[in-house]
Image: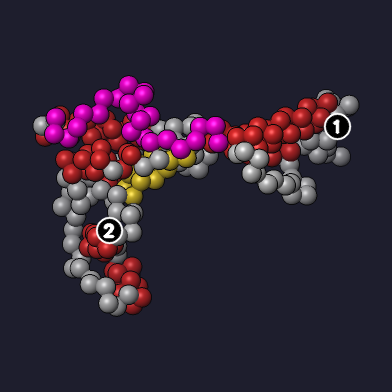
Amino acid sequence: MRTAPDSPGEDDPLGLDRAEREIRIEKLRREIDDLAGGQVVSGKMPGCDPELEEAFLQNVLELETHGCVRPFDVLIRDGLSLPTPAELDDTTLKKKLWELIHALAARRLYLYNTNHLSDHELYSWLWEHGLLEELMGFALPSGKFYLDIIGGGSDEDITLGLRYYDDENSRAAWAADFPEFPMPPREKPPYDRDRHLPQPNLPE
């Protein structure tokens, strides 16, 4: 007969491991509640694996402790130089842009929909806007983040998506749902960067 993962077995006949895990789980709950100012309402699903519950609560605690941070601040803290766009010529800016892109990917932040911007325009956008958005848990050893350059939802972003990135089916669906929205002609993006961008690994 197979022993349940967290029930007393031959290696732990007194159930001490289970008791210690329950103590750790309760401690995690208290720490999370303290960080949230007593505003956390938590429960437990019947039959929930205590090992999974502990791992989940540990992740929640890490997120709450780490909080929201700006990628720009994390990169500067970690020693990456980020000059203003005006300080860089075309050659040094291109090198710095790819150094930045790989530094973000190393911290699990991935860019996409960049092919409508030149190197200077993309670096400027990241420096002035993209890296200044606060992200919960950025630079923790788990989790992934995706930064869509046209993900702001503005009319300009939608138009860029329809012009450069959406296929004909997506364009037709948009036109059917929003016939009053001006449909731009479909064009090839002026730059070819996205296929060279770092991509996340398979789900962990």
Task: Examine the rendering and report whether any part of residue 196 can be seen.
Answer: no
Residue 148: image x %, image y %?
Answer: 33, 50
Disc number for residue 46? none
Between 172 and 75, the one lying in front of the other is: 75
Can residue 133 be seen here? The reply is yes
Question: Which contiguous range is marked in magenta?
Answer: 64-87
Describe residue 56's horizontal placement relative to residue 168 as left or right: right
Relative to 96, 7 lies left or right: right
In this picture, residue 12 sits left or right of residue 21: right
- Name the one closer to the observer, 170 or 68: 68
Vertical comparison of 83 with 131: above or below = above
Identify the residue at horizontal 32%, vertical 75% (top origin): 178
Location of residue 127 in the rendering, given as x and y in whole percent from the top left corner: 25, 37
> Circle 2 is placed at which residue position?
157
Q: Residues within 10 Å of mark 2 (few under 14, many from 20)?
A: some
Depth-wise, is mark 2 or mark 1 nearer the camera? 2
**Distance CA(mark 2)–CA(mark 1):** 57 Å
Residue 177 point in image, percent of width and height: 36, 75
In the rendered view, tell whether residue 8 sits above or below residue 167: above
The three-letter code of the residue at mark 2 reads Asp
Residue most toward the top? Answer: 79
Local SS, label 2? helix
Q: Residue at x 53, y 39 (%)?
A: 204
Give the labeled residue for mark 1.
8
